[in-house]
Amino acid sequence: MANLLTGKVALVTGAARGIGRAIAQVYAEHGARVAVADLLQDEARAVADGINDSGGRAIALELDVTDPNSVQQAVDATVAEFGRLDILVNNAGIHRGHLIVDFPLEDWEAVFAVNMRGAFLCSQASARQMIEQGGGGCIINMSSASGKKPDPQGAAYCASKSAVIGFTRVLALELGEYGIRANAVLPGATDTKMLRDVTDRVPGYMDDLVAATALDKIATPRDQANAFLFLASDLASHITGEQLVVAGGEFMET
């Protein structure tokens, strides 16, 4: 398979684990130089080391997506190391599960701070860099099938991921004149620690998720990473403002 991202530089948030780690690895396999950004610095460094040991190029960055200074430092460090920034993946996200009547305000605000404020701050700083350097760019936001359908104890998560979809559309509208594309990926159930944390709290939920898919299985992180690869590549050069659902038939829009 041809390298789809040769010469590109990508910043991937929440890249120490799960889907973010898989995205960083797949991007590197396809020739991108990757900034592996996460609060979990030791794990981010392990991901970057693995990419470098495999012949790719990566750096690990400590990043708090809710902090504007931390976000700007991550963008600056990426450009200082690799000379430019072509691709931003807003993958960092958290889930806090409670019934609405019992939902602590601090948990509600924490979910929105990471999932939506983080996407805004990283997109703003990265878009400014892409506009300044010229040559276009690509922003891919991690939404979720949960942004389109309700999940048990998922009020904050579902609402934040729905907000990401609207935000992505405005990004596409405003940044198109600079050649910058913006799209969202909406994963269905995917075998990550985040999902396991949810299903462990709700008996039978994992079985229900598997049964709901047309393919009779949940996704792997690499299944999702391949969607992010496509959207970052020139194969998607005329796609912007869209939502790509990767859910194995769990969720089908009409």
Image: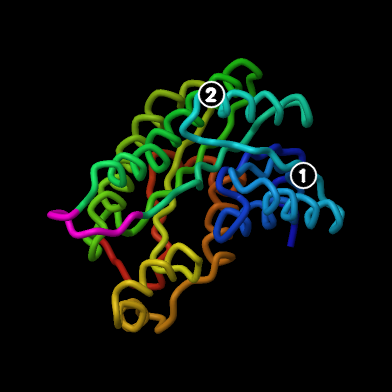
| Circle count | 2
Please tell me whether residue 43 is drawn above or below residue 151 in the rendered image: above
* Label 1 sits on residue: 58
Tell me, yes or no, whether the highlighted magenta stretch contains residue 98.
yes
Sequence-wise, the earlier of marks 1 and 2 is 1
Q: Is residue 63 visible?
A: yes
Image location (x, y in percent) of residue 26: 67, 57
Badge 2 element: helix
Residue 213 location in percent, x, y? 35, 77
Q: Which residues are magenta?
A: 96-102
Name the side, left or right, on which 62 lies relative to 45: left
Check disc 1 and give the amino acid type: Ala
Q: What amino acid is at disc 2? A: Ala
In space, the residues marked 1 and 2 are separated at their CA atoms by 20 Å
**Residue 130 got which mark?**
none
Q: Is residue 64 magenta?
A: no
Residue positioned 31% across, 52% down in the render: 157
> Residue 169 at x, y = what percent?
35, 36
Quarter of the image where the C terminus is located: bottom left
Q: Which mark is residue 125?
A: 2
Give the crowd class for mark 1: few <14, some 14-19, many >=20 residues within 10 Å.
Answer: many
